């Protein structure tokens, strides 16, 4: 009996505890509902000035006239190659001399008409003297025959007179050949050039038209770059635009940039201090009509001035060929967010706001918000992306912290101190977000400033 009473008492205690716990839970639930009703009735949302903000770094942008370039690599070649030799055969007796008085050798500069080498011309001189004697004899015989013909017409037939005239003409022709052979015994440079190869020495014999010197014109040189067929149309359109602009310019006017098919050339390698060589300005000289049979690419020729003779054929260089000049913005490539075939960036807008502490206002300030800008057209320019001005209007771009931003999100610009007053301008916000948007922004996790 005692055990039964203890068991009943135990169950009663458990029931009482359960009822008490249920009552406490109901009370707490009713209190939470009352708080929520009061918040919905009149509690203000967190002000935008006090809401958490994503730290970002910005870069000011200005619309400017930009060059759109395509980059190609190639080798420098001489403006023109010449292979020269004697037109007659014989033995070389001497070479021309350079400025130092030494025989011409590879690398020496020669002027047009300068003697490169001379051949033993004794045989040619003797032949010239022989032909001169023949001319004198033929002239005398013809003069005597004409005198006889005048005094006694029947003493000399017409055919004999014609033969004497022919003999004189043949002697004169032989004299011209002798003079040419004598002149060909001296080899002269056809142009002002540089000797790239010398293939003879004094005392050696050469055959007619055997190559003995190779000359290159290098006051101007050509950078030949290989262009794929997909880019030739673009280059040809630019060339036609350049030619049209040149026709419209006055004859005395200096060429404008839109009348020069410009190319910026960068030589490979560095100087002794590790610095890149200065950029050279060249001009597209020729777009080939057909592709190279071996590579299938089009060898585009770019003309470079080489007055100081510092450029040598065989040097490797890279050319940034200017295919267009347009007004727009150069934006760092890291600031662009690429998503499959779309791209966008974040700009910054500025809006006025009240400074509040508790329920008191202490004046006006500004808040910054992210503005997502979609890009429909852009051109990849290596470290930068060109965006046409007709596509968007920008005054700034987010360059750090942009990967976790959302449109209209509150921002904290961390590098404003890097700019002088007025150097960076933000677009004015067109509208204020509603309270629900502010609550969402306030609860968003901040972006790491190191991004």
Image (cartoon, rainbow, N blue to C red):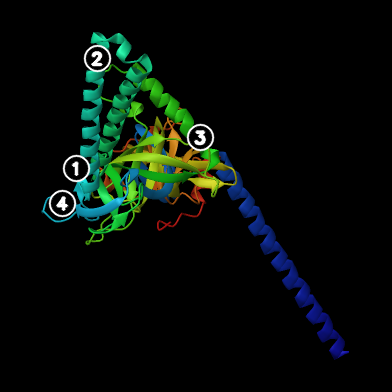
Distance from disc 4 to disc 1, alpha carbons, whole Å, reads 9 Å
Q: Can the viewer see residue 216 in this picture?
A: yes
Query: Which quarter of the figure has residue 88?
Result: top left
Q: Is residue 199 left or right of residue 391?
A: left
Distance from disc 4 to disc 2, alpha carbons, whole Å, reads 57 Å
Q: Is residue 280 left or right of residue 299?
A: left
Residues packed near mark 2 inside 10 Å, few (<14), some (14 to 19) or many (20 plus): some
Query: Which quarter of the figure has residue 398?
Result: top left
Distance from disc 2 to disc 1, alpha carbons, whole Å, reads 51 Å
| Residue position marked by numbered label 2 in the rendering | 148
Distance from disc 3 to disc 4, alpha carbons, whole Å, reads 42 Å
The residue that appears at 27% across and 12% down in the rendered structure is: 149
Q: Can the viewer see residue 53 in this picture?
A: no
| Residue position marked by numbered label 1 in the rendering | 114
Q: Nearer the viewer, mark 4 or mark 2?
A: 2
Under circle 2, the secondary element is: helix
Residues packed near mark 1 inside 10 Å, few (<14), some (14 to 19) or many (20 plus): some
| Residue position marked by numbered label 3 in the rendering | 289
Instruction: Tell me which numbered mark, 4 or 1, is placed earlier along the sequence.
Output: 4
Q: Is residue 322 above or below residue 333?
A: above
Distance from disc 3 to disc 2, alpha carbons, whole Å, reads 69 Å
Which mark, by number, is residue 97?
4
Instruction: Tell me which numbered mark, 3 or 4, is placed earlier along the sequence.
Output: 4
Distance from disc 1 to disc 3, alpha carbons, whole Å, reads 37 Å
Instruction: Tell me which numbered mark, 3 or 2, is placed earlier along the sequence.
Output: 2
Under circle 1, the secondary element is: loop
| Front residue (pair 243, 96) | 96
Circles 4, 2 touching at the beta carbon (< 8 Å): no
Q: Quadrant of the C terminus?
A: bottom left
Query: Which quarter of the figure has residue 27?
Result: bottom right
Instruction: Tell me which numbered mark, 1 or 3, is placed earlier along the sequence.
Output: 1
């Amino acid at each position: 009996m005692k055990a039964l009473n203890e068991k009943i008492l135990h169950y009663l205690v458990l029931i009482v505890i359960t009822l008490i716990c249920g009552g406490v839970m109901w009370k707490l639930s009713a209190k939470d509902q009352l708080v929520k009703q009061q918040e919905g009735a009149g509690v203000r949302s967190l002000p935008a000035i006090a809401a958490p903000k994503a730290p970002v770094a910005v870069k000011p942008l200005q619309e400017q006239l930009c060059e759109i370039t395509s980059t190609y690599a190639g080798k420098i070649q001489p403006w023109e190659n010449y292979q020269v030799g004697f037109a007659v055969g014989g033995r070389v007796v001497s070479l021309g001399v350079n400025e130092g008085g030494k025989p011409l050798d590879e690398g020496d500069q020669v002027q047009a008409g300068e003697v490169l080498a001379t051949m033993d011309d004794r045989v040619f001189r003797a032949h010239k003297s022989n032909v001169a004697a023949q001319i004198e004899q033929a002239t005398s015989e013809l003069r005597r025959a004409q005198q006889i013909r005048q005094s006694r017409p029947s003493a000399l037939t017409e055919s004999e007179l014609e033969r004497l005239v022919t003999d004189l003409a043949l002697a004169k022709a032989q004299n011209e050949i002798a003079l040419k052979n004598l002149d060909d015994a001296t080899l002269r440079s056809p142009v002002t050039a540089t000797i790239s190869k010398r293939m003879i020495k004094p005392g050696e014999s050469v055959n007619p038209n055997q190559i003995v010197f190779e000359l290159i014109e290098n006051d101007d040189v050509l950078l030949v770059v290989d262009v794929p067929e997909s880019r030739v149309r673009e280059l040809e359109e630019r060339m036609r635009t350049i030619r049209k602009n040149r026709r419209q310019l006055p004859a005395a006017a200096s060429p404008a940039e839109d009348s020069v098919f410009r190319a910026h050339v960068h030589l490979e390698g560095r100087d002794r201090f590790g610095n890149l060589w200065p950029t050279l300005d060249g001009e597209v000289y020729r777009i080939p009509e057909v592709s190279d049979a071996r590579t299938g690419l089009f060898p585009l020729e770019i003309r470079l001035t080489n007055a100081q003779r510092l450029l040598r054929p065989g040097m490797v260089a890279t050319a940034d060929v200017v295919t267009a000049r347009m007004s727009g913005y150069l934006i760092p490539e890291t600031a662009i967010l690429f998503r499959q075939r779309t791209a966008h960036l974040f700009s910054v807008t500025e809006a006025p706001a009240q400074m509040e502490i508790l329920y008191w206002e202490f004046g006006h300030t500004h808040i910054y918000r992210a503005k997502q800008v979609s890009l429909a057209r852009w051109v990849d320019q290596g470290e930068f992306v060109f965006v046409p001005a007709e596509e968007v209007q920008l005054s700034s771009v987010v360059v750090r912290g942009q990967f976790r931003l959302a449109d209209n999100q509150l921002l904290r610009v961390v590098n404003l101190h890097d700019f002088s007053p007025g150097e960076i301008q933000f677009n004015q916000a067109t509208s204020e977000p509603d309270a629900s948007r502010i609550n969402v922004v306030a609860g968003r996790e901040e972006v790491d400033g190191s991004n």
